[in-house]
């Protein structure tokens, strides 16, 4: 596939500087996964998720690769602006990127959000739950946040089930603040620390 110029990794001093920035981000490890800083090569995995049936929950037109790029870029930028953002989730055994978990805060959000996006073939194995727990623990234990939300399209049954498995509960007041257009699941530090 021919990639757009903005999707091609930097070289030389710019690549070295990007690597230094990536190295400054926290790395989280679980039993089977590593959550690490995203790099430009990870956009292919993000685009594969975005262009799949699951991508309809990401952007209005999930066939628009540029819209997916902008979504990916704003999740990465959150690290510089808020001190948290998206991690690439990779398998420990081979380093393959299989998805993303994020502590985000994007337009339309009223507070920090715990989100998760995985390749279709990575679903159903508990990987998202494992990664989301690690990100949530980082938010509560390291960043000192006391609450997070997961905002989920009412039709996104898999994400709803995951939020419930994580112990999050529906928040009617937060849903009303969003015009009752989405489900809002709340993660409270005192209720979910394990």
Image (cartoon, grey):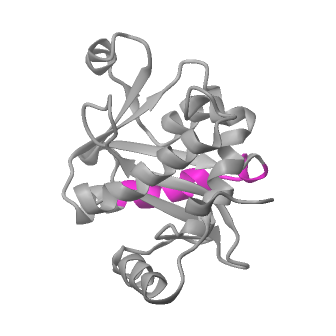
Please identify the quarter of the rendering in which residue 27 is found.
Answer: bottom left
Please identify the quarter of the rendering in which residue 77 is found.
Answer: bottom left
Residue 34 at x, y = what percent? 55, 72
Residue 141 at x, y = what percent? 26, 62
Above-or-below relation of 110 to 134: above
**Can the viewer see residue 194?**
no
Badge count:
0
Above-or-below relation of 29 to 87: below
User: What span is in magenta?
Assistant: 121-137
Residue 136 among magenta residues? yes
Task: Report the residue at 36% width, 78% height from top.
Answer: 21
Task: Report the residue at 58% width, 73% height from top.
Answer: 9
Residue 45 among magenta residues? no
Question: Foreground: 39 or 70?
Answer: 70
Above-or-below relation of 96 to 111: below
Residue 93 at x, y = what percent? 72, 79
**Can the viewer see residue 164?**
yes
Residue 51 at x, y = what percent? 71, 40
């Amino acid at each position: 596939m021919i990639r757009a110029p903005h999707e091609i990794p930097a070289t030389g001093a710019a690549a070295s500087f990007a690597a230094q920035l990536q190295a400054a981000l926290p790395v989280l490890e679980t039993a089977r996964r590593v959550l690490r800083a995203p790099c430009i090569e990870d956009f292919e995995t993000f685009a594969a998720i975005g262009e799949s049936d699951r991508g309809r929950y990401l952007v209005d037109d999930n066939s628009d690769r540029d819209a997916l790029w902008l979504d990916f870029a704003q999740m990465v930028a959150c690290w510089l602006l808020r001190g948290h953002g998206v991690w690439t989730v990779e398998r420990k055994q081979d380093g393959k990127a299989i998805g993303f978990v994020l502590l985000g805060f994007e337009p339309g959000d009223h507070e920090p959000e715990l989100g998760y996006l995985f390749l279709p073939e990575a679903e159903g194995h508990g990987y998202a739950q494992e990664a989301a727990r690690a990100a949530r623990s980082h938010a509560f234990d390291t960043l000192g946040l006391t609450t997070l939300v997961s905002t989920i399209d009412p039709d996104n049954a898999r994400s709803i089930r995951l939020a419930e498995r994580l112990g999050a509960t529906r928040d009617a007041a937060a849903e009303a603040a969003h015009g009752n257009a989405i489900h809002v699941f709340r993660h409270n530090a005192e209720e979910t620390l394990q």
